[in-house]
Amino acid sequence: MGIGRIGVWHPLFGRAPAPAVRRAAVEIEALGYGTLWFGEAPGTREAFSAAGILLAATERISVATGIANIWARDATAMAAGGKSYGEAYPGRFALGIGVSHAPLVSRRGHDYTRPLAAMRAYLDAMDAAAADLMLVDNPPMPRLLAALRPRMLELARDKADGAHPYFVPPEHTAHAREILGPAPILAPEQAVVLERDPATAREIARAHMDPYLKLPNYVNNLLHLGYEDHDFTGGGSDRLVDAIVAWGDAEAVARRIGAHLDAGADHVAVQPLPTDLRGAVDQLTELAPALGVRPGE
C-alpha cells in the first residue's frame, strides 16, 4: 500500500458535513499528501462510512482508519468491511483498529478488563472470518493496531502489519521501532500548529491535549516514557506540551516530523490543530514545501 511518508490526521474527516469533508479531501490530495486518517469515537460517523466518503471523493490518496473501534462491530464485520474496501480501492485503504479506552468502552456496555486479550482474540476471529470471504484485495489491505505499550506493540508485530500510535513524541517512535523490528509499518500521529508565539502555541496545544490527558492509556504511556505526575497538572507542563504538539514556523514543525522519521517511522500522520477544515487545509498548504510534500507524489 502506498501510504506515503506524510499523511494527514483530522477528527473532522469523521464528523464534519460530508460536502466539507469531500472538498478538504480533494484539496489535500492535490497538495500531495499520502494518506487521510480519522478516528472513531462518540459523535463521529461509523468508521467504514467515513472511509467511504473519503475514498469516493478522491482518486489516488490512501485512506486509513485511525482507529476503528473493535467494540463497535464484531470481528466478522470488521474483516468484511476492510476486505471490501481493499477490493474496491486496491492499494488505497488501511484498516487501523484498536481497543479504545475504558470510559468509552463502558458507554457501549462492554468490559474493558483485559484489552490485550480482547484484541488478540479479535484478531484471531478476524483471520477466521477472512478465510471465508469471497473477496480479493490485491495488494492485501494492511491491518494496523493502535499500539502504545510494549505488549500491544508486540501483538502488532506478531499478528498485524504494524502500528499506528497516537499522542506520542519521537521517543516513543524509537521505542516502538525497536519492538516492532524493521519490517512492520510504523505510522505515528503528530499534532502540529503553525504559531511562533510560545504562549499562544501552548494555549492551543493544551486545549487539544485536555481530553487525552483524562484517558489512562495515554497518561500511562507517557509515564512509561519518563514523564512525571507534575507534567500532567495545569493542562500539561511546557515540557509535555512541547513533546506532544509541534509548534513554530513550518521549518520547526518539519524538524519534528523528521525526528519521527529518523526514529524509525515509515509514515507520519500530521494533525493540524485548527478546529475547522478550512484552517487545517490552509496550514497543510503552508507546511507542504517544508515537509517535502509535492503534487503527484
Image: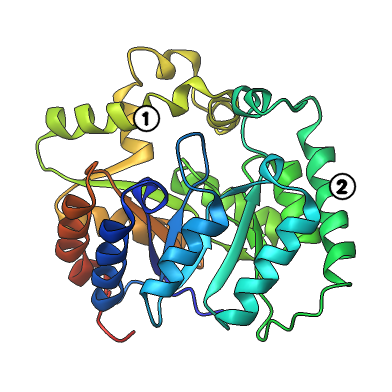
Per the model, the C-alpha gap separating discs 1 and 2 is: 31 Å
Q: Is label 2 in a helix, a strand or a loop?
A: helix
| Label 1 vs 2, first from the N-terminus | 2
Identify the residue at horizontal 53%, vertical 45% (top origin). 172
Residue at image mark 2:
121
Residue 283 image label: none
- Say if 286 sits above or below 120 in the image: below
- Which quadrant holds the N terminus? bottom right
- Say if 180 sits above or below 217 in the image: below
Comparing labels 1 and 2, the label whose residue is closer to the camera:
2
- Which quadrant holds the C terminus? bottom left
Foreground pick, 252 / 215? 215
Three-letter amino acid code at the position of disc 1 = Met
**Residue 74 position within the rendered picture, expressed as x and y whole percent measured from the top left:** 77, 48
Image coloring type: rainbow
Residue 263 in sight from this viewpoint: no
Identify the residue at horizontal 28%, vertical 27% (top origin). 207
Image position of 74 (left or right of 145): right
| The quarter of the displayed image where residue 101 is located | top right
Identify the residue at horizontal 17%, vertical 54% (top origin). 278
**Residue 125 position within the rendered picture, expressed as x and y whole percent measured from the top left:** 87, 55
Foreground pick, 153 / 258? 153
Three-letter amino acid code at the position of disc 2 = Ala
Residue 209 image label: 1
Q: Is label 1 in a helix, a strand or a loop?
A: helix
Image position of 28 (left or right of 116): left
Identify the residue at horizontal 39%, vertical 13% (top origin). 233
